[in-house]
Amino acid sequence: MEPLLGVKIGCLFAMLVLTLICGLIPICFKWFQTDAATGRHHWILSLLGCTSAGIFLGAGFMHMTAEALEGIEAEIQKLVTQNRTKSEGNSSDDADSTHIKYPYGELIISLGFFLVFLLESLALQCCPGAAGGSTVQEQQWGGAHGLELHSHGPLPSPSRGPLRAFILLLSLSFHSVFEGLAVGLQSTVATTVQLCLAVLAHKGLVVFSVGLRLVQRHTGSRWAMLSILSLALMSPLGLALGLAVAEGDSEAGQGLAQAVLEGVAAGTFLYVAFLEILPQELASPEAPLAKWGCVAAGFAFMAVIALWA
């Protein structure tokens, strides 16, 4: 076995094991259950939830959005260069330059944002009575000891909670596949190890935050474990695809399709982060500066990891 192939197989198993461990910790240990938390225990869980919110924001802006913009710009630049080569000598250079300056990446990310907005609007339009919620539903989604303790704002409607959780997992799954794909496409042992360590550093934190989020949303243990397992398999799947792609020639539009999909995933992730995660963590008026510090710390940690990712 070649050393590079052996390193990539080791990275594959490392991604799978670390993701499973980090994701299952908040699900398997009762200490992370917010229902039974009181006093200092509840306070610590609240700050931990704010830190996870900062991690989600950092992952959305510093990793998903940044990588999507870079990929879309590179692929469009490649297409424009090919068109210029084919139409060399024509007077279409000015038009091409105009197209390059247009923010295609931001447009695609915004389309992902509005896609989730449309899905939630359709869900509320088809089930108009779900927005109010009943007492039982409020207890199911808010909880007496949840992070929305002492909040006077409305609780998330039952129609939105499962949809946003599903979209969060779906967008992270897309991103995880592309992360694994990037590791699998590396051509040297050094770059493979460096990129894998960077991916593991931020992926472990993100998946832990996902597990904590599922616990806070009172997701059943079986469904939460299946969600973490499916998310854990995405990076190894992407790495395996990267190994296969490295052996052959990539198709013409494959890179652009991947960049567009990641852009849409980034837009959906930002929607969930801003309209689901942050409002819930900041709903309680207790110690706003401490919560701000935890959110900023989570974001700053992801920003530092982006130096190597």
Image (tube, rainbow, N blue to C red):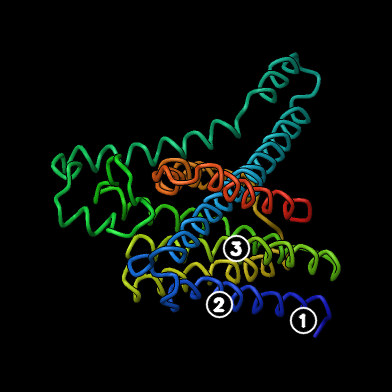
For label 2, the residue is 21
Q: Would you say 235 lies left or right of 38 here?
A: right
User: Viewer-proximal residue, 247 or 302?
Assistant: 302
Relative to residue 167, is residue 126 depicted above or below?
above
Task: Give the Cα distance between marks 1 and 2.
Answer: 23 Å
Q: Quadrant of residue 99?
A: top right
Kind of residue sitting beneath label 2: Ile
Mark 1 or mark 3: whose residue is earlier in sequence: 1
Q: Secondary structure at mark 1?
A: helix
**Which residue appears at 29% of the width and 48% of the height?**
160
Number of numbered callouts drawn: 3
Q: Nearer the viewer, mark 1 or mark 3?
A: 3
Q: Quadrant of residue 9?
A: bottom right
Instruction: Examine the rendering and report whether any part of residue 257 can be seen.
Output: no
Task: Give the Cα distance between marks 1 and 3.
Answer: 26 Å
Mark 1 or mark 2: whose residue is earlier in sequence: 1
Relative to residue 264, is residue 163 depicted above or below?
below
User: Viewer-proximal residue, 167 or 217?
Assistant: 217
Q: Would you say 186 lies left or right of 115 here?
A: right
Residue 6: mark: 1
Q: Position of residue 169 (x, y in %)?
A: 45, 58
**Which residue appears at 51% of the width and 48% of the height?**
265
Q: Position of residue 151 (x, y in %)?
A: 33, 44
Quadrant holding the N terminus = bottom right
**Which residue appears at 53% of the width and 35% of the height?**
108
Kind of residue sitting beneath label 3: Leu
Mark 2 or mark 3: whose residue is earlier in sequence: 2
For label 3, the residue is 205
Q: Position of residue 282 (x, y in %)?
A: 44, 44
Kind of residue sitting beneath label 1: Gly
Q: Nearer the viewer, mark 1 or mark 2?
A: 2
User: Viewer-proximal residue, 69 or 135?
Assistant: 135
